[in-house]
Image (spheres, helix red, strand yellow):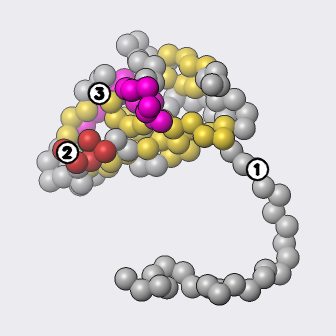
């Protein structure tokens, strides 16, 4: 287990929490009421900043229950180990009605993962059977 330092930036902000022993993600809570307009998006503050250890990243992911019940999805995001600003969640509302996020609502998940660094070297690439086949190249 790694240590992630957390600083509350707003009164009443909640630290990320897992909801079960087997959960991979830590729920992120809204720190302020925020209106997410129908078919629109809004940035929801969490009221916290985190310090991930070098060699790790935070992945912001949607909560499936919000998407199923209300049409709300968090946009995927990456929190780098050297970022110290407020963690915010970009919510998109696919529904035809506005949605009001209340302070204290769970709005996304945070998954912490190791980062593999790469050394890019420019050179010719080996041919493969797939070649340059991109989106949909194998059919529907």
Q: Which circle's residue, 3 or 2, is located before the other in the chain?
A: 2
Decide if residue 45 is on the left or right side of residue 56. Answer: left
User: Measured along the vertical axis of the image, is residue 62 above or below residue 25?
Assistant: below
* Residue beneath the point at 84% across and 72% down: 122
Cα–Cα span, label 2 and label 1: 38 Å
The residue lying furthest to the top in this view is: 11
Q: Identify residue for label 3.
A: 105
Task: Bin the neighbour count of mark 3 within 10 Å (Cα to Cα): few under 14, some 14-19, many 20 and up.
Answer: some
- State yes or no: residue 34 in magenta: yes
Q: What residue is disc 1 on?
A: 117
Name the image quarter holding residue 74.
top left
Q: Is residue 2 above or below residue 10?
A: below
Which comes sooner in the sequence, label 1 or label 3? Answer: 3
Tell me where the magenta segment starts and ends, as one range: 18-35
Q: Would you name the residue on which mark 2 appears? A: 70
Membership of 86 in magenta stretch: no
Quadrant in which the N terminus is drawn = top right
Question: Is residue 41 visible in the rendered structure shown here?
Answer: no
Q: Which of 125/71 is in front? A: 125
């Amino acid at each position: 287990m790694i240590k992630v330092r957390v600083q509350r930036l707003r009164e009443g902000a909640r630290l990320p929490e897992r909801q079960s022993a087997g959960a991979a993600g830590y729920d992120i809570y809204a720190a302020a009421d925020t209106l997410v307009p129908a078919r629109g998006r809004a940035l929801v503050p969490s009221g916290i900043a985190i310090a991930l250890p070098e060699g790790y990243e935070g992945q912001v992911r949607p909560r499936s229950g919000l998407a199923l019940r209300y049409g709300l999805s968090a946009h995927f995001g990456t929190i780098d180990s050297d970022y110290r600003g407020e963690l915010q969640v970009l919510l998109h509302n696919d529904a035809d009605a506005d949605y009001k996020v209340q302070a204290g609502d769970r709005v996304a998940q945070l998954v912490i993962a190791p980062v593999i660094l790469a050394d890019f070297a420019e050179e010719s690439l080996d041919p493969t059977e797939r070649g340059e086949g991109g989106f949909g190249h194998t059919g529907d």
